[in-house]
Structure formats: structure tokens, C-alpha cells
Image (tube, rainbow, N blue to C red):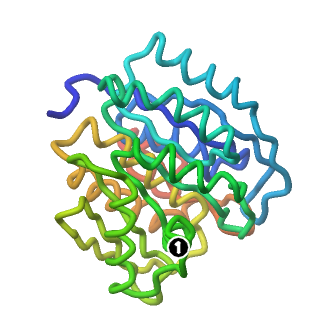
Amino acid sequence: MPEARIPNVLTIAGLDPSGGAGILADLKTFSALGAYGMAAVAALTAQNTRAVTGIEKVSPQFVRLQVETVFADVRVAAAKTGMLASAPIVCAVADVLAPRRAAGTLPALVVDPVMIAKSGDALLADDAVEALIARMLPLATVLTPNLPEAGVLLRRAAPTDRATMIRAAEDLRRLLGPGRERWVLVKGGHLDGDPLDLLHDGERMIELPGRRIDTANTHGTGCTLSAAIAALIPQRDDVVAAVREAKSWLTEAIRRSGELAVGGGHGPVHHFHALWGAASGHPRGTGN
């Protein structure tokens, strides 16, 4: 059943100071979709819409302390992980989340296997991939890889069409292990033409077609989609409904991204498209 109260949703990810990706994008998404957002910082980046110029990892012990301190006081309805940067950080986060997933005190976890920035810069150390597979994937309610990430997780070439996406979704679902209501969302934004996403739970293979929007403003789309799913799972009847609504909301955020003027590279999506008037600078409904 959906949450009767405003859900508290936690992101554990990296900081993008330009605000288009990472925990700042996650917090905007949570707020736009009616969730109370919280964040534990796993890494600091120096980046903008064009490039990542530096990364500073937070110590695994302090990442763990942030997450433990939140759980010690706050009822967390859902969490998502994003840029975890290194194997020790992945393991520290898994150590905190695993017992809470087992006990049911963390009802839902969205794992976004963030590996490469939109600029092409690496965001995950090579040795962290194995830790992610072994420690985080078994905890996931929803795993949200794009096509290159799916290839890395499966140690083979990235899917290039519907048929190879289906095989990837099936094989990734097996990596999650047994259990009901555990899903893989393979995102097909790297396909030519209109994108196709596949949502798979080991039995159902749900096709989620989309439409290509002619814009360069796609910075942080993966972070934003996974955050939207985490925000909506506690508020909707099931994962499928949450994913469908998250995709629809993100599509409009991309379509309306031209109302923002942020940077000269891959700009951000418009997280508050439903709340701000089109290019007016005023909230909808103010009459100003």
C-alpha cells in the first residue's frame, strides 16, 4: 500500500556543484514529487555541464556514519544509491543497508550504477564494479543501468538493440538473486532513434517506449530517473506504476529543459517544470 504520510527518501551519492546530477538533482526530484529528501555524500566532484575536473572521495567510515545517523533517527521509506566512487565506499554502504533491507526497515532501494558522467569522465573505480555486483545488487528493489552500464555489469558488449536488451535484462535480473518484487530497468537512451526501456522482474518483460527529444540538456537524467522512482515507490501501488510515472515526469522535465539557461554543455533537465511557470520566473498560479 502507498505511504499515507509524506515519505522520507534518502540518496547516497556524489555531489555535482552545478546542480544537474548527483545529490542536488536527487533532492530536487524528491521535492518535485512530494517526498522529503535526505542525502549522504559519498564523493565530491568539481564539474559543470561540460566536464568533471576533479573528484574527492569521502572516507568510507564517514559515509557509513552519515547513513547510520539518519537511520538512527528517521523512518526511511526508500533510498537510492548513485555515485559510490570506490569499492570501500560500496562495501561501507552495503554494510549499513543490508541488515535494514533484511529487517524491512528499508522497504525499497533503487540502485543506479553510476559509472560514467555525461561528459565521458569515469565516476567509478574499476575495482568497485565487482563490489557493486556482489554487495549492492542483491539489495536492490530496482536496478537502473543504461546500456553501457549493463555491458560493464555483465562483462560483455553493451546492448545495441531490443533483442540484446532483453537478454541483458534477463541476465541482470539473475544477478539480483531470488525474491519477489525485484526489478531491472534497462534504459535504452543510447539506442538510435526513439528510446526503449525494459522493466523486468524475472517473469514479466514490460516494454516502455519513449520519444527522442531534440535537446542537449540531458545532464543528470539517470540520477533524476532513479531518484524519481525512489520517491514514487512509497507513494504508488507498485513498482510498475512508480516507474511509469517517473519516466513520464522525466520526459516532461527534458522537454521543458530549454526554459533553463545553465552552462554551455549538456544542461540539466527542468526538475520543477510542473511548479514553475514557463520561462516566467514565477510559480504557476500566482497571477504575477
Task: Place residue 217 in its image quadrant.
Answer: bottom right
Is 154 located above or below residue 11 in the figure? below
Q: Is residue 57 left or right of residue 284?
A: right
In the rendered structure, which amino acid carries the disc numbered 1? Gly
Is 241 located above or below residue 94 in the figure? below
**In front here: 101 or 17?**
101
Percent position of residue 144, x then y: 43, 58
Is 231 located above or below residue 125 in the figure? above
**In front here: 125 or 80?**
125
Percent position of residue 97, x then y: 47, 30
The residue that label 1 is drawn on is: 151
Percent position of residue 91, x then y: 60, 37
Label 1 secondary element? helix
Q: Residue at x 81, y 42 (%)?
A: 56
Q: Is residue 262 left or right of residue 143?
A: right
Q: Residue at x 45, y 68 (%)?
A: 255
Q: Residue furthest top?
A: 73
Q: Quadrant of the N terminus?
A: top left
Is 79 located above or below residue 104 in the figure? below
Q: Residue furthest right?
A: 53
Task: Place residue 286 in its image quadrant.
Answer: top left
Q: Judge the density around disc 1: few (<14), some (14-19), many (≥20) Cα neighbours within 10 Å.
A: some
Percent position of residue 167, x then y: 34, 77
